[in-house]
Every structure is written in structure tokens, then in C-alpha cells.
Image: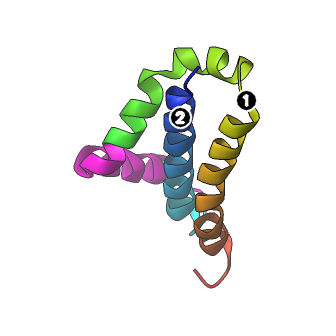
Amino acid sequence: MEIVDTKELLIGVNELALEIIKQTKDGLQIGQDLASIFARFQNDPVFAEKLTVAVKGISNVSAEIKDLSVQEGIELASIQLQYIPEIFKLLSKEA
């Protein structure tokens, strides 16, 4: 079984996580932060597409993970590893 929907969900979750970190870096201001994230969703078609695609196939993720092979697990880990440097950079005090 292909893990297309799982990969898309992982990408979407990471993209959203990066945006949440960016918006809350100056302190949590729920209303303002949510408005900023929504504004990016409306104004950045690449960001919006990643989130839309991530949610679209979410119902297939459970079945994909249930039948996960080692190679597919490595593919998912590889995708996640691509986001780690950016996450750490945003979470560091220098960012």
C-alpha cells in the first residue's frame, strides 16, 4: 500500500507547526496568532495547498500506517528529518 496520504499529512502537520512556532515566538496571543495563521492560509497558496492536501486524505492514514513497511517508515522519517533543523532554528533564542 502506498503511503501518499500519510506523507501529505506529515508535511501538512509540520508546515502548520512551523507557522505556529513563528506566530507564538513573541508569546502566545491566541486571537492574534490564529488570525495570522489564517491570513497566511488565505494569502499563501503553497501553504494552503499543503494543509488542504494533508486534511483531504486523512481518513486513509490509519490504514496506511497499519500496513507500514520498513522502507515506508524510513520515507516518513526522512520527511520528518527535513523539518527538524527549521524547527530547532525557530525554537532557538537566536531566531
Q: Quadrant of the N terminus?
A: top right
For marks 1 and 2, give the one nearer the viewer: 1
* Earlier residue among tags 1 and 2: 2
Q: Quadrant of residue 89?
A: bottom right
Q: Which mark is residue 9?
A: 2
What is the C-alpha distance between the residues marked 1 and 2?
18 Å
Q: Is 71 on the left-hand or right-hand side of 58?
A: right
Residue 62, percent across and down? Answer: 66, 17
Q: Quadrant of residue 52?
A: top left
**Considering the numbered disc 1 on the image, is that residue within a helix, a strand or a loop?**
loop
The colouring scheme, among rainbow, by chain, secondary structure or one colour, is: rainbow
Q: Quadrant of residue 18?
A: bottom right
What's drawn in magenta, residue-wise?
A: 28-48
Q: Vertical placement of 77 versus 65: above or below?
A: below
| Residue 32 falls within the magenta-colored stretch | yes
Q: Residue at x 39, y 32 (%)?
A: 53
How many numbered circles does the render carry? 2
Amino acid, disc 1: Ser
Q: Residue at x 50, y 60 (%)?
A: 23
Q: Is 17 on the left-hand or right-hand side of 66?
A: left
What residue is pinned by disc 1?
Answer: 69
Residue 21, percent across and down? Answer: 57, 59
Q: Which mark is residue 46?
A: none
Q: Is 2 on the left-hand or right-hand side of 36?
A: right
Amino acid, disc 2: Leu
